[in-house]
Amino acid sequence: MNRETIYFLEEGSTESTFCYDEDLPRLPLPPLDHTLKRYLESLKPFGTADELENSKKIIETFRTGVGAKLQKLLEERAAKEKNWR
């Protein structure tokens, strides 16, 4: 069983939900710093100044540690795959 036999746009249609996947452009992979900056911005309405400072420290630890390793893996996948997700 494959995706094209599972999902159809409407009953009786021969077009599947994913039939145009190959025609879509590659998904962009944002830089890690951009993603982390957006994440921190999304926290601002919900945290106190102290909580946001603590979040900045956690984000920096992630950015220089496991986050950098994960980003590298995503970049490698993006180089090989059309859509890296």
Image (tube, rainbow, N blue to C red):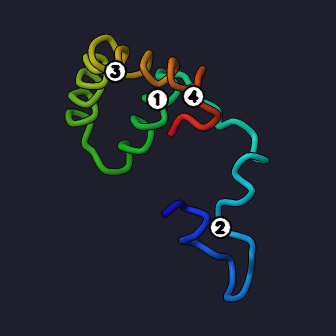
Is the residue marked by circle 3 packed among few (<14), some (14-19), or many (20+) residues within 10 Å?
Answer: some
* Labels 2 and 1: the sequence-earlier one: 2
Which residue is tagged 2?
17
Q: Nearer the viewer, mark 2 or mark 4?
A: 2
Residue 4, x across and y down, in percent: 61, 64
Q: Residue furthest right?
A: 23
Which residue is tagged 1?
37
Query: The residue under label 2 is which amino acid type?
Result: Thr
Query: The residue under label 1 is which amino acid type?
Result: Lys
> Residue at the location (59% across, 30% down)?
81
Report the Cα–Cα distance between label 4 and label 3: 13 Å
> Residue at the location (25% across, 42% down)?
48
* Labels 1 and 4: the sequence-earlier one: 4
Is the residue marked by circle 4 packed among few (<14), some (14-19), or many (20+) residues within 10 Å?
Answer: few
Which residue is tagged 3?
67
> Residue at the location (65% across, 60% down)?
18
* SS under mark 2: loop
Report the Cα–Cα distance between label 2 and label 3: 33 Å
- Verify CB contact (< 8 Å) between mark 1 and mark 4: no
Which residue is tagged 4?
30
Residue 62, x across and y down, in percent: 28, 21
Q: Nearer the viewer, residue 6 or 82?
A: 6
Report the Cα–Cα distance between label 3 and label 1: 13 Å
- Verify CB contact (< 8 Å) between mark 2 and mark 1: no
> Residue at the location (58% across, 72% down)?
7
Report the Cα–Cα distance between label 2 and label 1: 34 Å
Is the residue marked by circle 2 packed among few (<14), some (14-19), or many (20+) residues within 10 Å?
Answer: some
Report the Cα–Cα distance between label 1 and label 4: 11 Å
Residue 23, x across and y down, in percent: 79, 47
- Verify CB contact (< 8 Å) between mark 4 and mark 3: no
* SS under mark 1: helix
